Amino acid sequence: MNERYPNWMFAGVAIASYEGSDFLARWTGASGIRWVGYGVVAACAAILGVRYLRAFWSSRKKRRAPKDR
């Protein structure tokens, strides 16, 4: 797989959005801002989940493919 962004970048964005939304929620007193951070974390987790499932399935297909001799 040759994706444009590495997996660690999605993890970093998820952590930064979680911490940033928590800081803004405490600083402004608007607790609804946290839901934006939770949404970004959920989106990053979904993207990473799809990537890992694709990698799992493609490696599984390669192992099960009959070898040409």
Image (cartoon, rainbow, N blue to C red):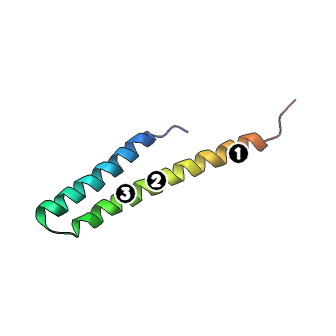
Q: Residues within 10 Å of mark 3 (few under 14, many from 20)?
A: many
| Tag 2 secondary structure | helix
Mark 1–mark 2 Cα distance, whole angstroms, equals 20 Å
Instruction: Give the residue displayed 12% in from the left and 64% down from the top.
Output: 28
Mark 3–mark 1 Cα distance, whole angstroms, equals 28 Å
| Tag 1 secondary structure | helix
Q: Position of residue 40 (x, y in %)?
A: 34, 58
Q: Which mark is residue 41?
A: 3
Q: Residues within 10 Å of mark 1 (few under 14, many from 20)?
A: few
Looking at the rendered structure, the kind of residue marked 1 is Arg
Earlier in the chain: of badge 1 and badge 2, it is 2
Mark 3–mark 2 Cα distance, whole angstroms, equals 10 Å
Reading the image, the residue beneath label 2 is: 47
Instruction: Give the residue displayed 51% in from the left and 37% down from the top.
Output: 2
Q: Which mark is residue 60?
A: 1
Instruction: Give the residue displayed 26% in from the left and 64% down from the top.
Output: 34
